[in-house]
Amino acid sequence: MFLVSFIPLQPDAPMGTPGLPHERSDAARNRERLLCAARELVDEFGADALTMDALACKAKVGKGTVFRRFGSRAGLMMTLLSDAESEFQRGFMFGPPPLGPGASPEDRLVAFGEGRIYFVLENGELLKAAGAATRNRFDVPATKLSHRHMEVLLREAGIADPWVMAMSLTYALDPERIVDDVRVRGISPSRLTDSWRELITRLLKTT
């Protein structure tokens, strides 16, 4: 498995151009300035308000600059999520048990789902918007990596068809459903994590 991070588009620069390191430093500062403006828009008005036009206006840059940097609205959303996603990925791939290696497949699956639920609640609006802005939300790199991680653990636990079962569990962790359950239906996060634990426990008892 590979650690997936979202890499925004970088402005072109000719190889060997004098002062290139300085230009890259400027580009990094400009990128962070755009991301800060994007985060402010999301905090103030929600993810739906974050458009390329709104970001250009907020950051006081041309719309073309925003498109060159992020490529699309989906690219912008994924870039905003990249730091948090990378941290979560490091946790389940390399971190301490039970989320990371060293625990049983059952304990790791329980910890993964619990961690993902709280991750979604912290970043839910961006996750929903990123998924909606892509042609197929299940082709988002982080979703594909999560599916692969669960598939490996399910195979280790003896599940007969781990790929399909991992897809079923992916649906159970759908960001839009989790956010709706908590914010619209009033279900507490602890009820969701308890339900996830029971689901995994019952599932693996059948193997």
Image (cartoon, rainbow, N blue to C red):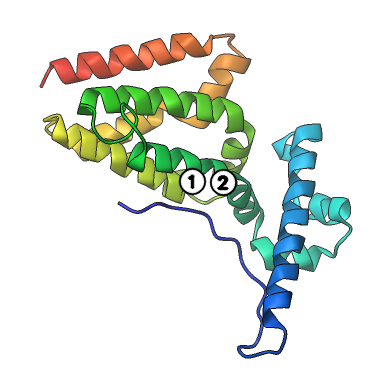
Q: Amino acid at mark 2?
A: Asp
Within the image, what quadrant is residue 56 found in? bottom right
Q: Amino acid at mark 1?
A: Ser
Q: Is residue 196 above or below residue 133?
A: above
How crowded pointer 1 is (Cα within 10 Å; few <14, some 14-19, many 20+) is rated as: some
Image position, residue 71 (x, y; %):
64, 63
Image position, residue 181 (x, y; %):
54, 16
Q: Is residue 15 above or below residue 33?
A: below
Left/right of residue 38 with respect to residue 145 in the rendered view: right
Residue named by callout 1: 86
Q: Residue at x 71, y 89 (%)?
A: 18
The C terminus lies in quadrant: top left
The residues bearing labels 2 and 1 have C-alpha atoms spaced at a distance of 5 Å
Image position, residue 176 (x, y; %):
54, 29
Left/right of residue 153 with respect to residue 188 in the rendered view: left
The answer to whether the residue labelled 2 contacts the one labelled 1, judged by CB atoms less than 8 Å apart, is yes
Q: Is residue 198 above or below residue 139?
A: above
Q: Residue at x 65, y 79 (%)?
A: 12
* Mark 1, secondary structure of its residue: helix
Left/right of residue 154 with respect to residue 72 in the rendered view: left
* Mark 2, secondary structure of its residue: helix
* Front one among 28 and 80: 28
Q: Residue at x 23, y 28 (%)?
A: 103
Residue named by callout 2: 83
* Front one among 132 and 99: 99
How crowded pointer 2 is (Cα within 10 Å; few <14, some 14-19, many 20+) is rated as: few
Q: How many marks?
A: 2
- Asked whether the viewer can see residue 106, the reply is yes
Image position, residue 113 (x, y; %):
38, 25
